[in-house]
Image: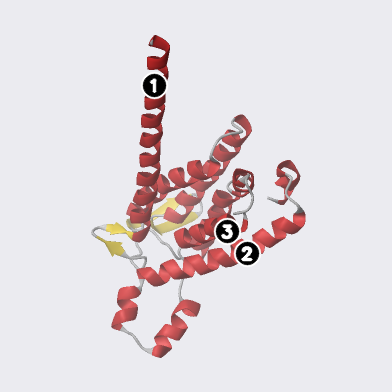
Amino acid sequence: MYARLETYQIPFASFLRMFFFCAAGGVIGSKLLFAVTQLPWLIGHFTFKNLLLFLPQSGYVFYGGLFGVIFTLLLMTRKDKDLRRVFRLAVPAMPLFHAFGRVGCFLAGCCYGKELAGIKKVGPLEFTRIPVQLAEALAEMLLFVVILIVEKKKDCADLLRIYLAAYAGIRFADEFLRGDLIRGIYFGLSTAQWISLAILFFYLIGFLRGRTGRRWAFRKTEKRETS
């Protein structure tokens, strides 16, 4: 992001301020969403000690962190008319950051995949579970490259929408390969899958409304020309 500040004419001091506030917003958002997924456990084991220790000792949820960062950026740039300029700077960093994060998940052994039937070897590596973390990291790297290509070819492209819609599809699919149940399963789908569906539904509605609006404007123009 630092290398792109001059391109988007963002002062370094503003970048630092946004970076630190976004980091805080990401941590708070990820912790809060994890707490929401664990509400049944917290209610069933409610004590003041568990309540006080829950957030500091709890895990992180990526979607919560992502929405925390987006909300923080919106809050900090609410007086800036050119919001797209800020998001075009920040969006390519999101899949890149997450790709390295998923490699970290693989090394730490969290967010693991389902068990394999026996040990599978890939070169020097041996797997007893589906390496879903590495698969998602690869998908995120590809998404990072795609966003950079779109950014260069289309100045008016909504990079945030492209990223959110694409990642929602990726996350919905790879959740079927996950083997950890701590993230919360509801009606056969995980919390992340329900959020992914909500994102896809939101953008689908926006797309359909946009098409309907364009058709209506075209028909009105056509009637004026014929009359």
Q: Residue at x 36, y 41 (%)?
A: 205
Q: What amino acid does circle 3 point to? A: Leu
Question: Which element type, helix, strand or loop, lies under badge 3?
Answer: helix
Q: What amino acid does circle 1 point to? A: Lys
Question: Where in the figure is residue 196, as x and y percent of width and height?
Answer: 38, 51
The residue carrying pointer 2 sits among few (fewer than 14), some (14 to 19) or many (20 or more) residues within 10 Å by Cα, namely some
Q: Residue furthest top?
A: 226
State the CA–CA distance, disc 3 to disc 2.
Answer: 10 Å
Q: Is residue 67 above or below residue 88?
A: below
Question: Which element type, helix, strand or loop, lies under badge 2?
Answer: helix
In front of the other: 206 or 143: 206
Colour treatment of the image: secondary structure
State the CA–CA distance, disc 2 to disc 1.
Answer: 47 Å
Q: Is residue 209 above or below residue 42?
A: above
Give the residue pinned by disc 3. Answer: 75
Question: Where in the figure is residue 200, as x and y percent of width and height?
Answer: 38, 45
Q: What amino acid does circle 2 point to? A: Phe
Q: Residue at x 57, y 58 (%)?
A: 75
- Badges 3 and 1: C-beta atoms under 8 Å apart? no
Give the residue pinned by disc 1. Answer: 220
Give the residue pinned by disc 2. Answer: 21
In front of the other: 190 or 11: 11
- Which mark is nearer the camera, 3 or 1? 1
